[in-house]
Amino acid sequence: MDADEALRFVDSLLVAQGKPPLNDLQRHVFLGCWKGMRFKEIHEACNSSVSREHLERNVGPTLWKLLRDAIGDPDLGKRNLRGPIERAWEKRSSASSAVGVIESGVFQPLLGERSIAEIRQIEPEMRSLIPSESWNTEHPDVSNFYGRSRQLDALSQWVCLETCRMVLLYGLPGTGKTALIAKLVEHVKEQFGMVIWRSLSRGNGQPLRPTELVADLLAVFSQNPATSDAAIANPRPSDLYPWLTQHACLIVLDGFEVVLQPGQHNGQYLPGYESYGELLEQLGQSDHQSCVIITSREQPREIEQMVGPRRPVREMKISGLGAWEGQRLFYERGEFVIDSEQAWQDLFDCYDGNPKFLGIVATRIYRLHGGNISQFLRRVKNDTPLIDDIPEILNQHFERLSELERQIIRCLTNKGQASTIASILHEFIVQSFPLSRIETALLSLQRRSLIDIEAECCQVSSSLICLFVRDWLA
Ligand SMILES: Nc1ncnc2c1ncn2[C@@H]1O[C@H](COP(=O)(O)OP(=O)(O)OP(=O)(O)O)[C@@H](O)[C@H]1O
Ligand SMILES: [Mg+2]
């Protein structure tokens, strides 16, 4: 196993456990240590403004802990890196090859081995009952879909091989949650008896009510005469249970945040939508054979309580595309000119790799700057990257914050660097906010992907968000 292979394996393991892949500094330290370099050499090679002490005292120990937790080997450390990682790699290869393999996000059952229906213990006579799809919205167009192979592999692994019951994808607006799940559905739908896709937003300001959703699902199932009409007249979440147990259904609930109450920081539901909490708990906790995938700009609290890398409920935070995978988003629109490869990286960093924002920016650069990316970057440096619809899209997300969340994110933006949780708590306690409310608000900002919390410190999740808070949230 070479260093790059090891890095890819570690990243896929982390992503599969719902954690982000290693960041740049962690990658430098990982690759350096894998090659047996000392911190002095790693520091010289990584060409970053951070000090050697920071690499050695903070980045290194945090990385070892992250890896120990990810592979479950307490002995992993700087001097004992290769052995534990290679053992974990061998273990995973043999486990997944028992029933099939995942290649580029597609599950390939091994010839003569068990099919998904068998893995999910579906009775033979039920397997061919309802092989169909039901969508309440247009199919998202994923004919021009780029990158995300690690996420697709991990998701396929969860839903096909590990028979997860519930998977949450969460992340900021426009990061590509819906597109990623649409691509996943394309790859894995053959493995499920039925695919049901429901967008919770109906575009009329009235999201799908929980009772409507349950009745709707039962109606879809009832195309099979075995369903009782009485259940549809008076639907309860538990009525779904027999169906989800007997069939391997893939159910997508897209845009879950629309049923959460804006202006609240403890994950409450809109009035009349409270029973979504109960529905999530039932779908995540009862022992059934189907898989429910949820996309949301916010993490629902019920799911937070149920997830775990070795549990049947998983979550994945979706961030932007990497510069290397997202460049085709530009070239599909026309010809672009750059001075250096670094310009791509700068552009992707500037927009956090957000495919929605990059699509807007690509159109702007093509139309106004003759496709010259470096010229656009110079213009952005002197002005603002928040162009066209980007502030409006971010504003929709910020409008959901409570007043205390707004104050905290303003405070973190003004500090311009990571702050200890203790210092933030102190700052707001002296303004007479109760401790538990401040903690809840911090967690809520994290659930909305607006701040990162790590090693008892927190900071705003990106410089684009900082700019938005400065310019638009005054
Ligand atoms: N991997 C990708 N390759 C190409 N285009 C992508 C990719 N991911 C997303 N996009 C495009 O970016 C735009 C935003 O993606 P998408 O709607 O999936 O984001 P989202 O996270 O679901 O946003 P929201 O929170 O608003 O629902 C869409 O036009 C989509 O087609
Ligand atoms: Mg979406």
Image (tube, rainbow, N blue to C red):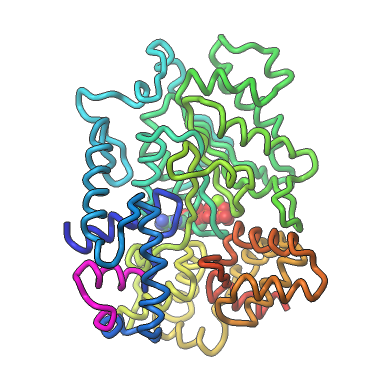
Compared across the picture, whether 15 is left or right of 454 comes to: left
| Residue 384 at least partly seen | yes
Is residue 40 shown in magenta? yes
Is residue 411 shown in magenta? no
- Give the x, y percent position of residue 362: 45, 70
- Please give the name of the residue rendered at 82% of the width and 71% of the height, measured from the top-left corner: 432
Q: Quadrant of the N terminus?
A: bottom left
465 relative to 110, above or below: below
| Residue toward you, 350 or 151 | 151
| Residue toward you, 258 or 121 | 121
Magenta residues, as a range?
Answer: 26-42
- Give the x, y percent position of residue 11: 34, 57
Compared across the picture, whether 405 is left or right of 44 comes to: right
| Residue 145 at least partly seen | no
Outermost residue, left direction? 1
Outermost residue, front direction? 75
Q: Quadrant of the C terminus?
A: bottom right
- Give the x, y percent position of residue 350: 48, 76
- Please give the name of the residue rendered at 50% of the width and 47% of the height, measured from the top-left corner: 315
Give the tally of numbered discs. 0
- Please give the name of the residue rendered at 23% of the width and 42% of the height, measured from the top-left corner: 93
Outermost residue, right direction? 432
> Which of the 4 quarters of the picture holds residue 136?
top right
Outermost residue, bottom direction? 382
Does the magenta stretch mainly form a helix, a strand or a loop?
helix
- Please give the name of the residue rendered at 21% of the width and 75% of the height, measured from the top-left corner: 37
